[in-house]
Amino acid sequence: MPDEIVLDHVAVGTADADAAIAALVGDLGGTLMEGGDAIGFRWVQARLGDGDEGMTVEVITPWQPEADDFLARFVARHVEGAHHITFKVPDLRRTLDRARAAGYHPVGENFDDPRWFEAFLRPREAQGIVVQITQSDPPPPAWPERFANRLARGGPDGRPTWWAEPPTTGATRVVLRRIVLRTPSITSAIGLWCGLLGGTPVDQGDDRIEVAWPGGRILLVEDAGSPPGFECLEADAPAALEAVRVAGAAVHTTAR
């Protein structure tokens, strides 16, 4: 099992999953990877990039809310938007012990399925966004292998394939570089993202710090005058695109 923490994906919640998928595939040139049913929601992931670069966006939509209405409540309150960031750790119990020792209060701890352990940090303790911390057994292959397997299959792995057929893949294929979050304090941000979650600072200024993991990056921008939380996704593209939103989440592109 890898001994490093991986930033697996950023998730957006919406009642209109087809529109979000259309934006990811048709507007941004993403590749649908896999999806299925879960308790209280359905999910599908798209890769903005390939096996060697880029990041993964997950679209989640309410389903059978009587089993768990967490996402239905989110959509009722916010309509749509960024919902959580998922990290995969080698030992969830040890990570949660470290979290509690550092003053965090993990919730939703679930060790019932030996193949999938999970817990969460609430937005008020995680810079304004839900953080999902997971452990999977066996751990997934690295992205080059996962992307190669997807190409070999010729289509996404659906368990089941619940989503509508997406549009033709757009000619402009973007590479998602980072998630941008607002934070009231760079110091507290470093404690969470670099301390507890093991990210590596790769660039830092007076009011910002970029943190990297296998799987992706987060840019934290200090803004004491705004609520903490999600700002946008930043991506590279062959040419700059007009503003694109995926389930309400802004995607800003830079021509490379």
Image (tube, rainbow, N blue to C red):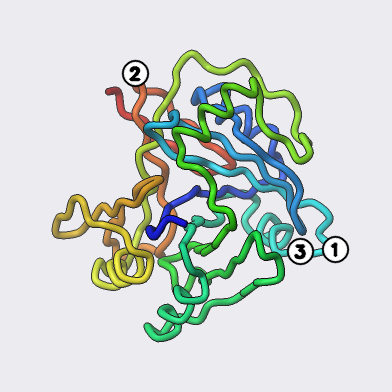
Other residues around mark 3 within 10 Å, as few (<14) / some (14–19) / many (≥20): some
Q: Is residue 165 left or right of residue 102?
A: right
Indicate which disc, 2 or 1, sits on the residue closer to the N terminus. Answer: 1
Give the SS element for disc 2: loop
**Could you tell me residue 250's position as x and y percent?**
46, 40
Q: Is residue 101 left or right of residue 224?
A: right
Q: Residue at x 49, y 33 (%)?
A: 145
Residue type of the residue flagged with mark 1: Glu
Q: Which residue is mark 2?
A: 239
Residue 191: numbered disc: none
Q: Residue at x 42, y 53 (%)?
A: 6
181 relative to 161, above or below: below
Tell me the CA gap for discs 1 and 3: 6 Å
Residue 66: numbered disc: 1
Across the whole image, how many numbered discs are drawn on residues? 3
Residue 250 visible in this rendered orientation of the protein: no
Residue type of the residue flagged with mark 2: Ala
Q: Which residue is mark 3?
A: 69
Q: Residue at x 44, y 37 (%)?
A: 251
User: Which image quadrant for residue 160?
Assistant: top right
Give the SS element for disc 3: loop
Q: Is residue 28 left or right of residue 74?
A: left
